[in-house]
Image (spheres, rainbow, N blue to C red):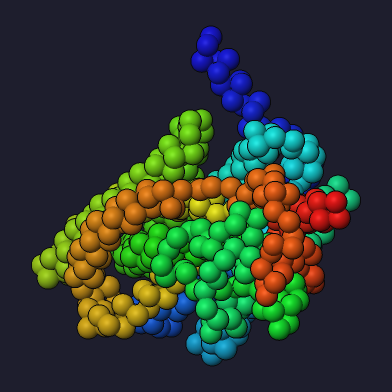
Amino acid sequence: MRIIKWCLKKLSYYVVFSKEALFIFGLIYVHSFVEKALVDILITHLPGVWDIPKSAKAVNLQEGTAAVLQILFAFASDVYLGHFKMVVYSTISYIIGLVLIWNAARHRSRDIRTFYLALVLITLAKAAKGVSLKAFLDDQFLAKDIATTEEDKERQHSRSNAWWRSASILGAIAAAFFPSSLTLLSVISAISMMVAYLWFWLGAKFYACNPSTGSAISDVLFVIKTAVLKRNLLYATTPEQLFQNYKGVTHIERGISWLRWLDKAPIVIEEENRPDKNCTVAQVKEVKFLLGMVPMWTTFLTYSLVYATGSTFFFLQARNLNKNFPITFFNILVTVTSIAIEYLCDILFQKIGSEMDKQLIMQVRIGIGMAFSVICCIFAWKNPAHWLYLVKIYSEPSINMDIFSLTPQFIFLGVMEGLSVGGLQNFFCSQVSKSLRNYKTPFGECVIGIGKFLSMLFILIFSRWFGHDIDSSRLDKYYAMLTLLSFVNLLIYWLVAYWYGDDQFSPEPLVEGAQDSIGSVVSQSFSDQTPNNPPHFSVSKRGTQSFPCPARNRLDGAHEQENKQLRHIKTI
C-alpha cells in the first residue's frame, strides 16, 4: 500500500494535464521520430554514394555544425524572434529539407547538390529546434502556474520534462516500425512533420509566448570587448577605479590568473567619463564564472570523440553485419538508456543538502560517465577485432557473428550520455549565475560539437586505418586508440574536478550585499573620494539590458535599485 501511495504521489508531482502541452506533444513526437528514424542514422544511407571516411566526416560536420550553432540560435531567439517563432521557422526548414532529401534519394547519384542543400536546411533546423522547442514547452508550464519559489519552479520543470521525455521515447519507439528505405523514410517523415506542424498551429491561441527581451550573451560579449579595448590600461589599484564596485575590491572574483585581464573591463576612463562605456564589477564576475567552465569543457573533447564514433562507425558496423536489421533499434536503445539514466539521477539526487554536496555529486556523476566511455570503447574494440578474424576465415562472416553482440557498446553509449551530459549541464548551473543557466544546453552541445569537428581531424590523421568499407578498415585500432585516450582523459578529468573543489570555484552570490556598501558610503563623505576617479551612479545605457529575461536575475535592475539608494544618501 505504501508503494502505491508513493507512486501516486510521484505521479501527481510529475504528471499534469495541459492543453498547450498536448498540441506541442505532437511536434516533439514527430521530431523524435524523424531524428531517430532518419537524421541520426543518416550515415547508413551514405556509403552507397561515398566511402566510409567521407561519410563519417560528412555526418560529423553536419552534427557538429548543428551543435555549435545552438548558441547563435539561442541568442537570436532571446533577442529577436522568441521561442514560438523559432519553433515555427525550424519546423518549416525541417519540412523543406526532408522533401529535398526525398527528391535526391530518387536519383542520388545525379542530384547530389540537392542532397547538400537538404543537409544544410536540416542542420539549421536541428540547431534551432534544440534551443526553442523544449524552452517553449517550459514557458507554457511556467506561465500556467507562476512559480513563486525555487521549489515551485523545479516542479514545473519536472512536469515539462515528463511531457518531453514521454513524447521523445514514443517517437523513438515508433521509428522502429518503419522501413529503412531512404526514399520511403524521407517522404513519411516529411508528411508526418507537416501534420504535426498543422496540429501545433491549432493550439496557437492557447500558447503563452514570452516576448524577446534580451540575452545574457550580449553582456558576455560586451565585457570581453571592453576588456580587449582596455587591454593597455594598468590594473586598478584602488576600489574607486572600478565601475559600480559595491564590495570595494580590486581583484574581481574568480581569482584565476588567466582571467585576470577581464578585471580591466570595469576600469573608469576619466577622459571619457561615460558610464555606457564601462562594465560593472558584477558583470565581469559573471563572465569570469562562465569562462571558468573552460577546463571542465576541455575534458569533454575526448568524450565527444567517443560520442561521435557512436553516431557513425557503430551504425556502420551494425549495417555491415545485417543489412536487413532495423538499425533504428540501436538508436532507440541509446535514447531510452540515456533518458532512463538521467531520470534516475534526477530522482536519486533531487534532495541533496548543501550546494557543495550537490557539486561533489555532479562531479562524481560526470566521472562515472567518463569511466563508462572507457568501458564502451573496450567493448567496441572487441567486435571489429573478432569481425576481421571472421573475414579472413569465412566467405560470409555475418553468419558466424550475431548482430546483438553490438548491444553492450550501444547501452554503454547511452549510459555515458545520461551520466556525463546531464551532469555537465547541472554542473554548469552550479557554476554560473542564474541569468546564464538557461544556456546550459547550448554551451554543452557546443562542446560536443567541437569534439565532433575534432573527430573529423582524427579520421584524417589516421586515414590509413580506414578503407572503402568496414571489411577493409581497421576499426579495432581506432577503437583501441580511443580507449587509451579515454582512460588518460578520465585521469585528467579527476585532476580538473579536484581543481574545481577549491574555494575559489565554489558558487557564490553575484550581487553582493548592498547594505554593507551603502553603510561604507555613509561613513565616508563623498568629498573624500579620489578626485581623479569619481564614482558613477548611473547604470549602463546600452540597448540590451543586462540579463533581462523575466525568469532570470536582473543584475542591472538590482544595481539600479542600489544606485537610487546611493543617490539618496548623497543628497543627504
The x, y position of residue 362, in whole percent, is: 42, 44
Q: Quadrant of residue 313?
A: bottom left
The x, y position of residue 97, in whole percent, is: 64, 74
Residue ID at (89%, 51%): 205
Residue ID at (40%, 59%): 296
Residue at the far left: name it.
393
Q: Is residue 241 above or below residue 519?
A: below
Q: In this view, does 114 lie above or below 280?
A: below
Instruction: Tally the numbered discs.
Output: 0
- Is residue 381 among what the camera can see? yes
The x, y position of residue 344, in whole percent, is: 46, 36
Q: In this view, does 412 lie to the left or right of 253?
A: left
Foreground residue among 299 and 330: 299
Q: In this view, does 453 lie above or below 327?
A: below
Q: In this view, does 459 lie to the left or right of 420?
A: left
Residue at the far top: name it.
1
Q: In this view, does 198 lie to the left or right of 103?
A: right
Foreground residue among 308 and 51: 308
Foreground residue among 282 and 373: 282
Residue ID at (57%, 76%): 227
Residue ID at (53%, 9%): 1
Q: Is residue 222 left or right of residue 169?
A: right
Q: In which quarter of the image is residue 478?
A: bottom left
Foreground residue among 196 and 251: 251
The x, y position of residue 286, in whole percent, is: 58, 60
